Amino acid sequence: MVLKMEIQSSLHLLEQMHYELAHDEMREPYIRVTVDGKKMLFKLRGEEFKRFFNYHYIRNNSNSPDAKLIKDTLAYLDGRAIFEGEMIDPDVRIVGDTDLLEIDLCDPSYRVVQVSTEGFQVCQSEGYFLRRHGQLPLPQPELMTPGEIFAAMNDFKAILNVSDEQFILVMGVILMGFHPEGPYPVMFVQGEHGSAKGSLCEAIKSVVDPNTTPHTALPANAPDLLIQARSNRVLSFDNLSEYTFNKKHSDLFAQMATGVGLRRRQLYTDDGESVINVSRMILMNGIDDVVTQSDLGSRTIGLRLEPVNESNRISKREFKRRLSEVGPRMFSAVVNILSDILRNYDSTDIRSGARMFDMIQWVTAGESAMGWESGTFQRVYERNQLEVMEAGMGSDPLAAAIIRYMEGKPRWEGSISRLLACLIAGTDRGMRSGPHWPRNAISLGRALNRIETNLRALGISVIRGGRSATERTVTIINANMPQPDMQSESVVYAANERGPEQGGEAA
């Protein structure tokens, strides 16, 4: 193939940088170059690479490349990256798997921390990292003894307003922030003014993914959230309230924890499609309890902080100073723990029905390095998950009505419409006036889908039965009570209930 002399000159410039071409699974082309021993990855179609190419072209040729030369060179490289280049999985801050992790220090030398079962080393990257504006460098980690790890954890805890049990969950969140693929937890920190909830989120992010802007604005839609996620390994949202955080946000955050994709038509094409897939850990804080949907609640670690005593209150500036002192040692401790996690991960046996099973296994694999008894994190996490579910139920009138209705009942059977009549009879008008209260049997069936995960966590199971002549039946089992003989008492609860059409509405 004969190339124009101008393009050959451009390629010669890139050849001096040992350029490599690649693409991801969505056929986005990339180029990696080595400059002064530093491996730098760029999106081939991005503005950052155009600036890079312009700069080095001028340095080598004493004149600027014209627009046509840049366009022709990029078009040639684009095709080669897609059809000849290796398929890669680039990301920000962390790449790898459960055998080998790489953590981008985001320093000017483009160094990474390579963590394996044998330990860790600081070196040039073998993985593919994207750099984003605002990313701050992580410190070079140090090898630590078990005593030094424990001391670093205690020093970090000392600047936070958390209890011993809450700190176990904080450590779990920090360690999970370095998991290569998730699914990730959502951590919600609730507390009144002066409880240092925002500082806790900022401290966690500073250890995992420091940024010039620790908190990001609440996204208006899925594309906005995905753009934020592509620039941050950990997303942190400050001062959420029931007025700013709605069901749409709840659904988006639940999807982001496990992985969410966005498809949109590419510009200037008839059927071309660009796809963004990403999964991220989320930190959020606020005064109001905004975790009311079961899908988000089952992924959430909830911490409620007490106000900081006035004698212990410090300025934001002083907090940042203390964090800058203990943060580097905390990062070193985490890197040491991560090596233990990789070493123990496959052999760590977990028995749990929790949705965040992967997190339990990941953190449990590092418990010995933290001086914890085996199973410590799982016990604390599962207790916290029950508290999150209970809190979510308390803010949902339908869930509260079912819990109240099943008090003293081991089991209930009947039709969906019959269940609605029984719930209406035992719930006052004020509770039934909100948007979450079902208006008919069909909406009740849909609402049960929304809350059944939380109900199950509290020992109440909703089981759909077969369809009668007119509608589907449902069975509710209260596992908190001894179960009766199926042929006797189970039918009594359905037969003896009086709905509003038989005994009037509740006041």
Image (cartoon, rainbow, N blue to C red):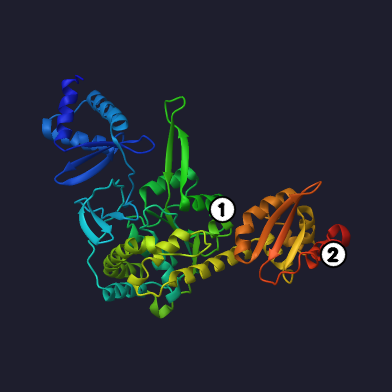
> Depth check: 489 or 309 in front?
489
Would you say 495 lies left or right of 269 here?
A: right
Residue 321 position in % (x across, y down): 29, 68
Q: Is residue 359 above or below residue 59?
A: below
Would you say 154 lies left or right of 488 here?
A: left
Residue 20 position in % (x across, y down): 23, 37
Q: Residue at x 33, y 49 (%)?
A: 92
Circle nearer the N terminus (2, 1): 1
In which quadrant is the C terminus drawn?
A: bottom right
Q: Nearer the viewer, mark 2 or mark 1?
A: 2
When asked about the image quadrant of residue 4, the answer is top left
Residue position marked by numbered label 1 in the rendering: 246
Mark 2 is on which residue type? Asn
> Depth check: 6 or 29 in front?
29
Which residue of the protein is positioned furthest toward the bottom in this rendering? 311
Q: Secondary structure at mark 2?
A: loop
Residue position marked by numbered label 2 in the rendering: 496
Mark 2 neighbour density, 10 Å: few (under 14) some (14–19) many (20 or more): few
In which quadrant is the N terminus drawn?
A: top left
Residue 360 position in % (x across, y down): 44, 63
Which residue of the protein is positioned furthest toward the right in this rendering? 502
- Could you tell me how far apart the alpha carbons at marks 2 and 1 are, in whole angstroms? 39 Å
Q: Is residue 37 visible?
A: yes
Mark 1 is on which residue type? Asn
When asked about the image quadrant of residue 490, the answer is bottom right
Q: Secondary structure at mark 1?
A: loop
Q: Is residue 64 visible?
A: no
